[in-house]
């Protein structure tokens, strides 16, 4: 950079960071959401469902506490972090891998773009971070995800040349997060970047082996360091059978820097960089690569119900009995799987569950205990108003919504049975109608404090 630009770059770290939300189009429209929360927000140029919001108008915490958030109508996400999933361009019905997925913003964005179809394998190697990943996936109502907690090397053995697209948002030195996270500045050292480069190359090697010929891989970081960005892409191009696909600069993103590679080849300007002094977002690097070859189509899905065990078949029958009494639901044909007492409806392209560490396989329907079925929070978050035989709708601002989210019993009369508690028409969770009251079934770990 020349001196003037460098000074603007350094000054940006003392400026205001940018905050964003992304509308969950599986549940609502942009217009409906903005009307419900009563805010006028600025659009994010690179994400049609993304919006900036300003802390001078409302606090960051408040958007995470609104009932609309608890209904899974939007996801709070740093604006520049919305670009990698857009660069991947997943299509409905594809097989997609988010290899370094927690806490789940990019997985949820991919699931939206896939319209909850196909198979989305969402992995994180850290078991503690996987818990947050599962909650966010359930909150957003995703049903096509297989959430796993494995090393890339282990997944590579399970899924050789399996995926149409892979998102690789790798661990990095985090220079782009210095304004957002002051602890990242304190923990930074010049040695960390070289360690990250080795790890990034190791992860990429597994990702490449899991990608079909003709498939797409998006490599992204939240750092400025060329060693982890352009020079890594140059390394990948020298080792693997790839080509760099051009991403169009938008909204302040600019082309990546070929002059920072060893070869100075102009093809390395096809990625994107976001600089915090030039665009409304934190530092980010994104590059789209295509594995050479012809992409093979995915097989046609089965159109029948099936089970991975006799116990799964019994549990599925109990679920159907529950659904007949409490839901208006055409059965989604697929394969039922039970682990312990937990019943799942597997996503597309999964006929069984591989022998790996996993936390969620498709739609977690509920618990099968002593011949009875108890519905899950995951199930209700995946359903729409027309799916319920009994529901109670509270207007936005009604004090009963907060009482419900805090786990309190509500006074209400109605037909006995499982009831969907909703803000407007959007489900928040289950309650059980009994003797003039609604027994609160909202999960303890989700409750508002």
Image (cartoon, grey):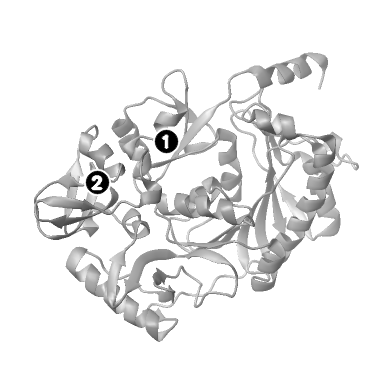
Q: Is 426 in front, or is 151?
A: 151
Q: Is 165 in front, or is 173?
A: 173
Per the image, the residue denoted by label 1 is: 64
| Tag 1 and tag 2, C-beta contact below 8 Å | no
364 relative position to 176: left or right = left
Per the image, the residue denoted by label 2 is: 422
Task: Count neighbours of disc 2 (C-alpha within 10 A) and say few if under 14, some if 14 to 19, many if 20 or more.
Answer: many
Q: Residue 350: percent from the left, percent from the top?
A: 50, 73
Quarter of the image for residue 179 reads top right
C-alpha separation, residue under disc 1 versus residue under disc 2: 17 Å
Quarter of the image for residue 211 reads bottom right
Residue at 19%, 64% in the rendered image: 326
179 relative position to 63: left or right = right
Q: Residue 354: percent from the left, percent from the top?
A: 57, 75
258 relative position to 310: left or right = right
In the picture, the quarter occupied by the N terminus is top right
Up the image or down, 11 lies above or below 436; here it is above
Up the image or down, 291 lies above or below 372; here it is above
For the residue labelled by badge 2, is the local secondary structure a helix, a strand or a loop?
strand
Q: Is 87 in front, or is 413?
A: 413
In the picture, the quarter occupied by the C terminus is top left
Total of numbered circles in the picture? 2
Q: Is 112 in front, or is 321?
A: 321
Residue at 19%, 40% in the rendered image: 394
Residue at 66%, 23% in the rendered image: 278
Q: Residue 318: percent from the left, percent from the top?
A: 27, 76
């Amino acid at each position: 950079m020349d001196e003037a630009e460098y000074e603007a770059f350094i000054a940006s770290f003392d400026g205001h960071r940018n905050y964003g939300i992304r509308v969950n189009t599986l549940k609502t429209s942009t217009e409906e959401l903005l009307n419900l929360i009563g805010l006028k927000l600025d659009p994010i140029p690179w994400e049609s469902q993304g919006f900036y919001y300003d802390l001078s108008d409302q606090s960051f915490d408040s958007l995470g506490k609104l009932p609309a958030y608890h209904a899974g109508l939007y996801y709070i996400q740093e604006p520049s972090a919305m670009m990698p999933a857009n660069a991947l361009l997943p299509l409905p019905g594809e097989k997609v891998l988010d290899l370094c997925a927690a806490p789940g913003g990019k997985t949820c964005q991919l699931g939206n773009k896939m319209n909850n179809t196909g198979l989305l394998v969402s992995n994180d190697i850290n078991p503690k971070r996987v818990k947050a990943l599962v909650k966010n996936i359930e909150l957003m109502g995703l049903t096509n995800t297989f959430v796993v907690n494995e090393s890339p090397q282990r997944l590579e053995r399970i899924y050789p040349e399996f995926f149409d697209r892979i998102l690789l948002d790798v661990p990095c030195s985090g220079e782009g997060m210095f304004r957002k996270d002051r602890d990242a500045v304190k923990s930074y050292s010049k040695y960390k970047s070289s360690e990250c480069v080795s790890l990034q190359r190791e992860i990429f090697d597994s990702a490449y082996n899991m990608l079909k010929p003709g498939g797409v891989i998006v490599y992204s970081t939240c750092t400025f360091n060329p060693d982890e960005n352009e020079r890594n892409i140059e390394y990948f191009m020298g080792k693997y059978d790839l080509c760099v696909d051009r991403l169009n600069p938008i909204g302040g993103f600019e082309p990546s820097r070929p002059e920072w590679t060893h070869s100075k080849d102009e093809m390395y300007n096809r990625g994107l960089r976001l600089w915090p002094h030039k665009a409304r977002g934190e530092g980010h690097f994104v590059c789209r690569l295509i594995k050479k070859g012809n992409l093979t189509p995915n097989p046609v899905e089965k159109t029948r119900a099936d089970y991975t065990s006799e116990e799964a078949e019994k549990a599925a029958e109990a679920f159907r009995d529950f659904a007949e009494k409490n839901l208006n639901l055409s059965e989604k044909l697929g394969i039922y799987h039970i682990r312990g007492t937990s019943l799942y409806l597997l996503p597309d392209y999964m006929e069984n569950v591989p022998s790996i560490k996993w936390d969620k396989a498709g739609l977690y329907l509920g618990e099968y205990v002593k011949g009875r079925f108890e519905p899950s929070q995951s199930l209700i978050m995946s359903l729409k108003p027309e799916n319920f035989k009994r529901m109670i709708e509270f207007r936005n601002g009604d004090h009963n919504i907060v009482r419900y989210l805090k786990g309190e019993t509500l006074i209400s009369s109605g037909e006995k049975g499982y009831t969907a508690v909703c803000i407007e028409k959007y489900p928040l969770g289950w309650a059980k109608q009994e003797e003039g009251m609604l027994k609160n079934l909202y999960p303890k770990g989700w409750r508002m404090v």
